[in-house]
Amino acid sequence: MNDAQRDLMEQARDSLNAAKLLLNNAYPDIAASRAYYAMFYLAEAFLEGDGLAFSKHSAVIGGFGLHFSKSGRVPRELHQYLLDAEDARHVADYGPRKLVDAARAMELIEHAEEFLAEAKKQIGPIPLEDG
């Protein structure tokens, strides 16, 4: 794990923790957005390991799909989770309030947890958290 990957994984962990806090405090739409960002940072961490970096969200998502999901380097559902979370984030951030309910936010958080578990397995543990 290089320094950039470690930073991205820490951002992902923090976003996931924030998503849980937000959901527990009745902010499911904002929690969904943070769950998306957790997955987005993890996708960037995977790409960084291959020396790939993109400036647009769509390019990160597409690059992750091409280099990791389609190639079988990660379970295919992780790319779908990222795509679904991006859609939910757009609704949560730009749509009318409360369109993302608690059940949907919880589902996104669970998907972000799966994504993080795969990143820890392939990239490595997050220092000072996983020992």
Image (cartoon, grey):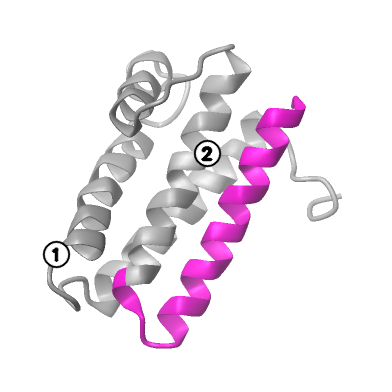
Q: Main secondary structure of the magenta part?
A: helix
Q: Residue beneath label 1, please? A: 95
Residue 80 percent coordinates (x, y): 27, 38
Horizontal and vertical percent position of residue 27: 36, 80
Mark 2 is on which residue type? Leu
As helix, strand or loop, the secondary structure at mark 1 comes to loop
Amino acid on which disc 1 is placed: Gly
Q: Which residues are magenta?
A: 1-29
Residue at 75 percent of width and 25 percent of height? 2
Task: Tell me which label, 2 or 1, sits earlier in the chain.
Answer: 2
Residue 115, can we see it? Answer: yes
Percent x, y for residue 59?
A: 33, 23
Reply yes or no: does residue 86 show up in magenta: no
Q: Looking at the image, is 17 positioned above or below residue 113?
A: below
Of 131 and 22, which appears nearest the observer?
22
Q: CA distance from mark 2 to mark 1?
A: 25 Å
Residue count near mark 1 (Cα–Cα under 10 Å), binned few <14, some 14–19, many ≥20: few
Q: Residue 88 falls in which quadrant of the image?
A: bottom left
Q: Nearer the viewer, residue 55 or 110?
A: 55
> What residue is shown at x 43% (from left), y 41% (from top)?
40
What secondary structure is marked by label 2?
A: helix
Q: Which residue is mark 2?
A: 42
Q: Is residue 122 above or below residue 86?
A: above
Q: Is residue 102 left or right of residue 78?
A: left
